[in-house]
Amino acid sequence: MPGFERFGKLERKEVEDVLDNGVLMRYGFDAMRNGHYKAQSLEKELQHTLQVKHAQLVTNGTAAVSVALALAGVGAGDEVIIPCFTFVASFEAVMMLGAIPVLVDIDDTLTLNPEAVKQAITPKTKAIMPVHMCGSMADLDALKAICTANNLKLVEDACQAIGGTYKGKYLGTYGDLGCFSFDFVKTITCGEGGAVVTNNSDYAVLADQFTDHGHDHIGNDRGAELHPYLGYNFRISELSAAVGLAQVRRLKDFIAVQKKHYTILREALSTIPEVTFRRVPEGGEESYAFLNFFLPDLETTRKVAASFKDNGVDACFHYYDNNWHYVRKWEHLTNLKSIYPISKEVKEGMSYLKTKTFTASDNYIGRNLSCLIKLSWTEDQVKQRAQLMVDAINRSL
Ligand SMILES: *Cc1c(COP(=O)(O)O)cnc(C)c1O
């Protein structure tokens, strides 16, 4: 998935535009900037590429999730249902707002299990946040129906799945709000950056204000602008936006290369009867950022993961034994190890984590390997890799 593999002439050219005039901020300084508005241009390009009415750039993907949830009205003591297999940013972004992340089981899509979501709804639930992990999506129709029936907002974390689609819509544009990350290891990168997208123009106005200290952005004197609401600073810099502008124009090419490499690897692994693949919900198409597959049991999966490492098959993750993406290793969250005091409401609201088990998810994550698809491989390298993977699996079964 990494856009960093493709930092080249196009990215350099956009950055040079900014360096030529030195206006590193997205707002104001109109006379100095020689017509270059990189953040604005990137927002327009995202709207066009993802076929969505509004895009608001922010500093990073974690901020995008916090901002999207704030726009959805999530705040003190509210509960947000999220999957127990996700990146740590998901619960961080919820807790930043003084809200309570409610972790629930995943299913064979490796994302939210709609049945587990239903069971987790309480009077405090405000939003459901599927995380489209490793390039593929949650069952969005089922989640939307639950949201409609319970008057909840659907916020998609599409940080790992830009370019994937569900029933003809780009991931991130199906729910009330969607979030993207452009950090250095995502499909397209700004260095650091993120975006919130929505088709709701009320949210778009609030997003524009909230991410810039509440400024209403009316008139051309920044000092005289009013503050209809309290805000914060989540502004992206023009330098970061410039990199992203070059990258977003290459998104379709990147996805096509990912698809090609993914397909070669998948076809090779399909010859092994013990290997099964993650389920992609009907009507969905992955972004091909990762190839995810299951082995028969935990022990075999550990053996294969070790054999991959020993044989130079890098960037394949066994999330069960990894500290970043699965609830099993999040002791800092379970024990609420915070450098600042956490409210009584959140402490009480999260005490469930001390006893809750995730047996169904353990079964999926324990047997899953998730292999990053790189852009820089040659076709020969992908084929060699496929053979190494097949051999390692066959030896471990
Ligand atoms: C990367 C990521 C984020 C956070 O993005 P940053 O830009 O690194 O802050 C959030 N959610 C998921 C699923 C991610 O993979």
Image (spheres, rainbow, N blue to C red):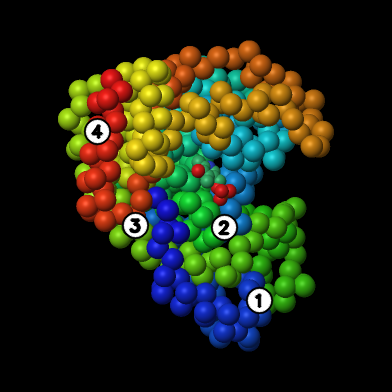
Q: Name the secondary structure under disc 4.
A: helix
Circles 2 and 4: CB distance less than 8 Å? no
Q: Name the secondary structure under disc 2.
A: loop
Q: Earlier in the sequence, mark 3 or mark 1?
A: 1
Three-letter amino acid code at the position of disc 2: Glu
Residue at x 68% of width, y 36% of height? 95
Three-letter amino acid code at the position of disc 1: Gly
Residue 144 appears in the picture as rendered: no
Q: Which tag is nearer the camera, tag 2 or tag 3?
A: 3
Query: In the image, which disc is placed on residue 390?
Result: 4
Three-letter amino acid code at the position of disc 4: Val
Instruction: Name the residue tied to disc 2.
Output: 192
Q: Earlier in the sequence, mark 2 or mark 3?
A: 2
Q: Cβ of disc 1 within 8 Å of ligand 1?
A: no
Q: Earlier in the sequence, mark 2 or mark 4?
A: 2
Residue at x 48% of width, y 64% of height? 244
Residue 365 picture location, percent across and down: 43, 25
Q: Which tag is nearer the camera, tag 3 or tag 1?
A: 3
Circles 2 and 3: CB distance less than 8 Å? no
